[in-house]
Image (spheres, rainbow, N blue to C red):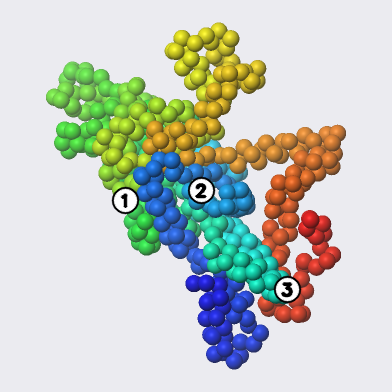
Amino acid sequence: MSYTSIANEVQTLISANSKWTGISGEAVARMRLQNRFANGIEIAKYTASIMRRDMAAYDLDPEQYTQSLGCWHGFIGQQKVISIKKHFGNTDRRYLYLSGWMVAALRSEFGPLPDQSMHEKTSVPALIEELYTFLRQADARELGGLFRDLDKARAANDKARSDQLQNAIDNYQTHVVPIIADIDAGFGNAEATYLLAKKMIEAGACALQIENQVSDEKQCGHQDGKVTVPHEDFVAKIRALRYAFLELGVDDGIIVARTDSLGAGLTKQIAFSANEGDIGDQYNAFLDCDEVAPGQIANGDVLITRGGKVLKPKRLRSNLFQFRAGTGEDRCVLDCIHALENGADLLWIETEKPHIEQIAGMVDRVREVIPNAKLVYNNSPSFNWTLNFRQQVFDAWEQQGKDVSGYERGKLMSAEYDGTELGAEADERIRTFQRDAAKRSGIFHHLITLPTYHTAALSTDNLAKEYFGEQGMLGYVAGVQRKEIRQGIACVKHQNMAGSDIGDDHKEYFAGEAALKAGGEHNTMNQFAA
């Protein structure tokens, strides 16, 4: 429905109510357009349809991969999407990611915590709601500017400009984009997973990422000590997510099934197996076992049978069972196939390094069973990207017989290699990594989990060094404000970004000429009008 149509419809309603004095149909139309989503469920439905469309486009052309950056505050997510719209003109194929790691480290009332599901689980849906509150405010702010420009054009009788602005309003693209949200291992059993999933969906999440670790033993995917669960336990949680989506009417909701098996050498329990070759038996086949004779059985031993043999799985003092070394990739492949066969939409394989062929090797095997299998991939800050890619180039050159005597493999992170041929080739591989991996390794969505954690630390360090040093106030002016002005960063007008002009518009709607507005000629933000 167009802006004019909404205004006319509302004006008809107002005209039928004689006591609604001073109410403007056009003002109501503006407020409705500035707040087009009534609740999180509407957002989840809208963004799920975007993701489904993007997934279908990727199946036809892997160049159409999607991207996101992890955001730990609504303001950070808002500024990211504002920047995307400014630089690229639209938000197509660009999402937000909500990282459980950053919620634990930055959003818990306990203070900074490791990524072990110790933070308040309600802080996750709270952050989703906060992100969408800020994105919706970005819509209100930008549309408010268009409305004010429209009023100026009308006052000047500039029809061409008025028509142009009217068209921009009618075809406005919202800042609301899909969020892929991390539910860790579900924060408990399948029922707990379902309850939390509902809260996350109600807040607006259209895509939930769940991992196959034991909930109360959960570790960051890039740390040691990870413990996985049998497939049937994980499938129960996948079903819990699907039930939550369907109950709330988000029929297109997306489930991302993450496997940590590549780096997880332990399981908390032996899987139930009713028949040889069933999924429980396949899981147990990876256990590190010793064959035992009847006379070798000791008190407290846990035993299983396979192929007519009695086997004793290796059990640690922690009561965890050990997998055989070198089985990680095979377990990942089985995890992925079983998850997709039981309702997951996308996969996530947590790897220890960004290596296209390693990822592709596993995805190729999954696609032998499920041809359209697609990945979400963590372009993690836990990887030393510079060192990894320089070593990859070094190894490739060495295999090709190229002279690498001028490089020391273990010290390739050194700045002395920045201007070298090897450094340049490594940087080019990093630059094209996402495109190349989307094409070769089945990666539909590339994300960086913790970028804004690191950018906050880096920018704060740079400012503190200059401001508290000899540069003094110039450290802020030259390092921040001047750059904001020259790069067109909207936040330089921070009163406007915080909603001051939106408030002035509302004051005028409510009080008319009696409105006491903040944006008068004495507002110091006018210094940034040029």
Percent position of residue 332, x then y: 34, 32
* Residue that numbered label 3 is attached to: 156
Amino acid type, callout 3: Ala
Q: Is residue 343 visible?
A: yes
Element on which disc 3 rests: loop
Which mark is on residue 255? none
Amino acid type, callout 2: Arg
* Residue that numbered label 2 is attached to: 94
At x 43% / y 40%, what residue is drawn? 63
Task: Quote the CA–CA distance across marks 1 and 3.
Answer: 60 Å
Residue situated in front as seen by the camera: 61 or 280: 61
Q: Nearer the viewer, mark 1 or mark 3?
A: 3
Dividing the picture into quadrants, the one containing residue 252 is bottom left
* Residue that numbered label 1 is attached to: 239
Q: Give the side of residue 319 with respect to residue 126, left or right.
A: left
At x 73% / y 55%, what residue is drawn? 494
> How busy is the neighbourhood of tag 3: few (under 14 within 10 Å), some, or many (20 plus)?
few
Q: Nearer the viewer, mark 2 or mark 3?
A: 3
At x 28% / y 46%, what residue is drawn? 342
